Image (cartoon, grey):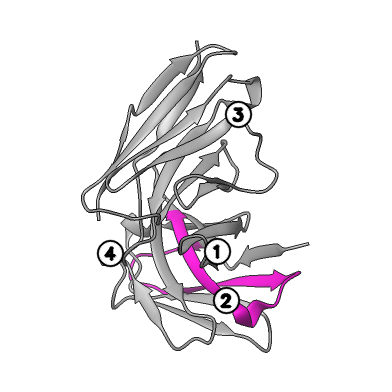
Amino acid sequence: QVQLVESGGGVVQPGRSLRLSCAASGFIFNTYGMNWVRQAPGKGLEWVAVISYDGNNKYYADSVKGRFTISRDNSQNTLYLQMNSLRAGDTAVYYCAREDLVVAPAATMYFDYWGQGTLVTVST
Amino acid sequence: IQLTQSPSFLSASVGDRVTITCRASQALSSFLAWYQQKPGKAPKLLIYGASTLQSGVPSRFSGSGSGTEFTLTISSLQPEDFATYYCQQLKNYPYTFGQGTKLEIK
């Protein structure tokens, strides 16, 4: 069965860095795009970043562009999020999510599997 | 692309039929998905392609719409349906979510 397990969250001071990991199993990891989505306490969902199946294409939310880097190691079936220059506003539960694509009858994408999330708290 | 859900809060009873609307600032074609989230849990995919029911999701859930206006309908509310619902557009980067609709028990 498909499993996504995030790790690496914790409490970090403003301006410091943190790296999140998402270990994938139960599917052919190197054939799927992967995303990070976050949710601040009591707030809605915010998409953070996406990486293509081969790691060659990456896109970011404006709120994290230049500070966060998404990457993947297909040999280890693991997705990463390197978070630098962290701010209080980055405090959230971070989820990794698998992106699937269908082409018929009409092309569309969706996030069909999500991890359980890892909490990042940026605070002094 | 901005997504605006309405209402933001909805109070309903078991057995009710409810509809949640998601309006987009640009046409989305079929690049619209709906998720359900319960407290402390990850979101769960309900509908993709605006109207395709994800495998394993009860048939009381349905989605419709095209262009810039989409709806999620629950035909007969069950106790386990009380949760927060989000729409998401995957037409363009950055992907965006609606602000959410919290469905509460009346």
Which residue is label 2 attached to?
A: A79
Which dot, 2 or 3, sits closer to the camera?
3
* Residues at circles 2 and 1 in contact by the CB criterion of under 8 Å: yes
Which dot, 3 or 1, sits closer to the camera?
3
Q: How crowded is mark 1: few (under 14 residues within 10 Å), some or many (20 or more)?
A: many
Q: Which mark is residue B60?
A: 3
Is residue B38 left or right of A88 when viewed as pictured?
right
* Residues at circles 1 and 4 in contact by the CB criterion of under 8 Å: no
Q: Which residue is drawn at 48% across and 62% down?
A: A109
Relative depth, front residue between B25 and A19: B25
Q: Is residue A51 placed above or below A109 in the rendered structure? A: below
Name the residue furthest left. Answer: B25
Q: Which amino acid does label 2 sit on?
A: Leu
User: Which structural element holds mark 1?
Assistant: strand
Give a yes or no on whether discs 3 and 1 share a subunit.
Answer: no
Which residue is label 4 attached to?
A: A63
Q: Which mark is residue A96?
A: 1
Give a yes or no on whether discs 1 and 4 share a subunit.
Answer: yes
User: Which structural element holds mark 2?
Assistant: strand
Q: Which amino acid does label 1 sit on?
A: Cys
- Marks 1/4: CA distance? 17 Å
